[in-house]
Image (cartoon, rainbow, N blue to C red):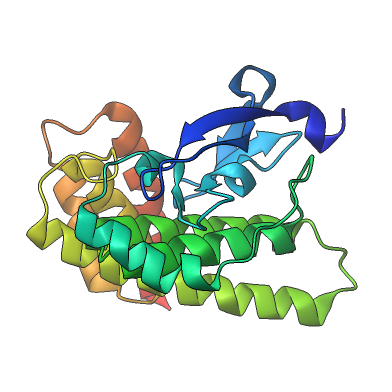
Amino acid sequence: MEEKDYLFGKTYTCPACGEKFKNLTVRTGKVRTIGSDMDLRPINEGVDAVKYEVVMCGECGYAAVARFFEKPLTSVQRKAIEDKITIKFKPRPEKDAYSYEDVLERYKMAILSTVAKMGPASEMAYTCLKVSWMLRGWRQGLADSETARKQKLEAQEREFQKKALEGFVTANTKEEFPICGMDENTLDYLTAVLYMKFEQYDKSSKLISRILSSHSASSRLKDRARDVKDELATYMKG
């Protein structure tokens, strides 16, 4: 199967301009998830579903990760999108599949839209996390010989992971749960993994301990937390 065979055009109504449009979306029944990375990035067979998580209006340029796209906008937010996004937006021809270069541009539009509408810290953090996942998938799909490009993508991935970490820490203190569909234990786990990636081992360890002693955390999440604990122990021993 080609990548386009996993996709279909889903109809959306833009909350910024009111136009109806179609956006490429993964057919969930055709994609099999075969695992996940420590930071919860899904590993899919056949297509990298993270490439198709941004919804972007072809009329005005408003974009957001699908989880947030259809949330109503205030009149002030719609005006901000018009003034800061639409005025510079040039419609792009629709394709039957997206390259990673296409997807990076779509995620950039989602970030610009989040900034323009002054979206919550959690939305920006979640979008940056998805960008880091997308960059990892891009990097892993390159040939071993493309060393320089892989290094550049890895550096970009870390930049977005750092932004995601900062945003989730802020959201945890200012927003109510669930945050981006995550309960407190799941967000603690994800934050712990991101802390570990930036060598903030004490902060990571404290969150992992909290999960392992929690009565509400699922056994599956505790298993994942134990894996992080083992990896932390290795790092902290030096």
Question: At which x and y percent is residue 26?
Answer: 63, 31
Task: Using residue 16 as the reference point, say whether residue 94 is left or right of it.
Answer: right
Quadrant the C terminus occupies? bottom left
Q: Who's the residue at 70% across and 57% down the image?
A: 92
Q: Is residue 12 above or below residue 169?
A: above
User: Looking at the picture, how far across and down is residue 82, in whole percent?
Assistant: 39, 64
Of residue 79 and residue 231, the one placed in the foreground of this image is 79
Residue at horizontal 27%, vertical 66%? 167
Residue 238 visible here: yes
> At 78% from the left edge and 56% from the top edge, which residue is drawn?
141
Task: Pick the quarter of the image with the N terminus.
Answer: top right
As drawn, which residue projects farthest toward the top? Answer: 29
**Residue plotted at (81% across, 78% down):** 147
Of residue 63 and residue 211, the one placed in the foreground of this image is: 63
Residue 233, image x and y in percent? 36, 63
Q: Is residue 29 above or below residue 53?
A: above
Query: Foreground: 207 or 155?
Result: 155
Q: Answer with left or right where residue 120 lies relative to residue 199.
A: left
Q: Considering only vertical position in the picture, is 190 above or below 132?
A: above
Q: Quadrant of residue 173?
A: bottom left
Coordinates of residue 37 in the picture (x, y in percent): 53, 48
Q: Quick check: 198 left or right of 54? A: left
